[in-house]
Amino acid sequence: MIYTVECSFADPDSEAEWNDFYSLEKLPALISVSGFHTSQRFRALHGGCPFYLALHSIDGLDVLMGEEYRQKGGGNFARWQQHITDWHRNLYDGVERAPSIGEGEHLALSANGPEPLIRLGLIPRAMQAVAMEKVPEFRWLAKVERGRTADLKSSPEAVHFYAPMTEQLTHDTAFDKAR
């Protein structure tokens, strides 16, 4: 399943420090939780959606309800909570693992069906919200390969594009580094 966390941040003075916390502390803590398989963080290329997106591949809702998640990954935003806006969390079924988006690649998301992604020559993967906010109920994601960035300029308004802020972390890699 894919666990999404989306938000914007309203304080430019502390945003760099918040991004360091999220990318360097929060993601590694999350990926160490049993049931988390991948984690990656993104920044929106255009407006019309929350500015930040984190995609996590997890086993299911029980992972997010467990004590290990609460201890290692849940919460710990108190310092920045007042600046976090447009915050949304969803759990989607239909895609087992989030694609790894590398440097020069982008992630495309559509809540208006797969057609906008297909018209861009992308291969959409369907997801259905099964827990949390459940909005949007359906989403389609696609990987935009290197060299296809020209497609982003002529994209339909219904498609949101994201650039990676981090590499995709994997549970196995985090476990190996901890040893």
Image: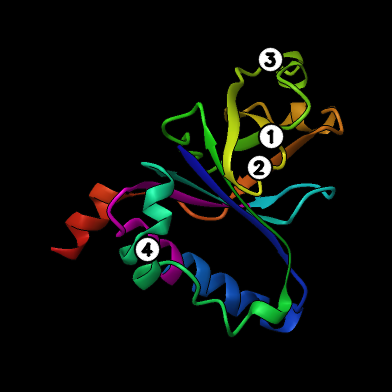
User: If you read the primary sequence from the N terminus, does the residue marked by circle 3 or circle 4 appear first?
Assistant: 4
Pointer 3: what residue?
A: 121
User: If you read the primary sequence from the N terminus, does the residue marked by circle 2 or circle 4 appear first?
Assistant: 4
Viewer-side residue, 104 vs 10: 10
SS at mark 1 in the image: loop
Please report contact status of discs 1 and 2: CB closer than 8 Å, yes or no: yes
Q: Which residues are magenta?
A: 25-42
Residue 26, position in %: x, y? 45, 68
Type of the residue with mark 2: Lys
Type of the residue with mark 4: Tyr
SS at mark 2 in the image: loop
Q: Nearer the viewer, mark 3 or mark 2?
A: 2
Instruction: Establish if 74 lies above or below 152.
Output: below
Q: Is residue 132 visible?
A: yes
Q: Quadrant of residue 142?
A: top right
Pointer 4: what residue?
A: 69
Pointer 1: what residue?
A: 137
Please report contact status of discs 3 and 4: CB closer than 8 Å, yes or no: no
SS at mark 4 in the image: helix
Q: Nearer the viewer, mark 3 or mark 4?
A: 4
Type of the residue with mark 3: Gly
User: If you read the primary sequence from the N terminus, does the residue marked by circle 3 or circle 2 appear first?
Assistant: 3
Dot 4 crowding, Cα within 10 Å, few <14, some 14–19, many 20+: many
Q: CA distance from mark 1 to mark 2?
A: 5 Å
Type of the residue with mark 1: Glu
Q: CA distance from mark 4 to mark 1?
A: 24 Å
Q: Residue at x 75, y 39 (%)?
A: 160
Residue 141, position in %: x, y? 61, 30
For the C terminus, give its image quadrant.
bottom left
Q: Residue at x 82, y 28 (%)?
A: 155
Q: CA distance from mark 1 to mark 3?
A: 24 Å
